Image (cartoon, rainbow, N blue to C red):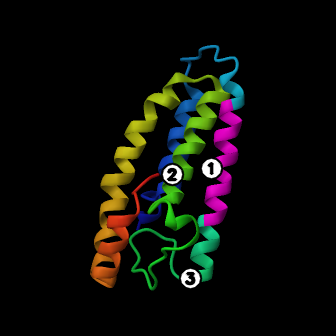
Amino acid sequence: AMKWIDLPPVWLAACLILTWLSPWVVFLGPLHLLGWLCLLAGATIMVAAVLSFRMARTTIIPRQDPSALITTGIYRWSRNPIYLADVLFLVGVALILGRCLGLVLVPLYIYLLDRRFIRGEEARLRAAFGPKFTDYAASTRRWI
């Protein structure tokens, strides 16, 4: 009944809210610009990934069975560009706000994505596409 809560955007929102509410603030000066660059890069990667899903006419929802294996576009460089974009959003917001907690949450968020989503998604892709997925996974990095 509450499966919608266990989705990557909800976990990202929780990390962003914790980052925003964190009293642990430092002055980061020139890293402010780096934060905006991370947000821009994340948005660009996200748009490219979503367009790839639309063109392939397959589900973007974790834990649903895929109808296509996407290996072109942004997926030539990363097997998980949407999760990469999420991480860039978290880093960007942390840098813009100067909140160290956001940077501390990054490895925890990556771990959560790997354990709760990526492993299951890759198992479904392997089951659906067999050697085609195995070859893709061998030639394309998980993140970057």
Residue at mark 1: 42
Could you say whether the residue bearing mark 2 is in a helix, strand or loop? helix
Q: At which x and y percent is residue 131?
A: 28, 81
Mark nearer the N terminus (3 vs 2)? 3
Boundaries of the magenta span: 34-48
Picture disc at residue 56: 3
In this rendering, the answer to whether 4 lies above or below 106 is: below
Please identify the dominant SS of the magenta region: helix
Q: At which x and y percent is residue 24?
A: 54, 17
Tag 1 and tag 2, C-beta contact below 8 Å: yes
Picture disc at residue 102: none
State the separation of the CA atoms marked 1 and 2: 7 Å
Q: Residue farthest to the top? A: 27
Q: Dot 2: within a 10 Å radius of its alpha carbon, few (fewer than 14), some, or many (20 or more) residues? A: some
Location of the N terminus (image quadrant): bottom left
Q: Is 39 colored magenta in this rendering?
A: yes
Q: Dot 1: within a 10 Å radius of its alpha carbon, few (fewer than 14), some, or many (20 or more) residues? A: many
Mark nearer the N terminus (1 vs 3)? 1
Q: Specify whether residue 124 is in view.
A: no
Residue at mark 2: 84
In this rendering, the answer to whether 81 lies above or below 133 is: above
Tag 1 and tag 3, C-beta contact below 8 Å: no
State the separation of the CA atoms marked 3 and 2: 20 Å
Q: Is 16 colored magenta in this rendering?
A: no
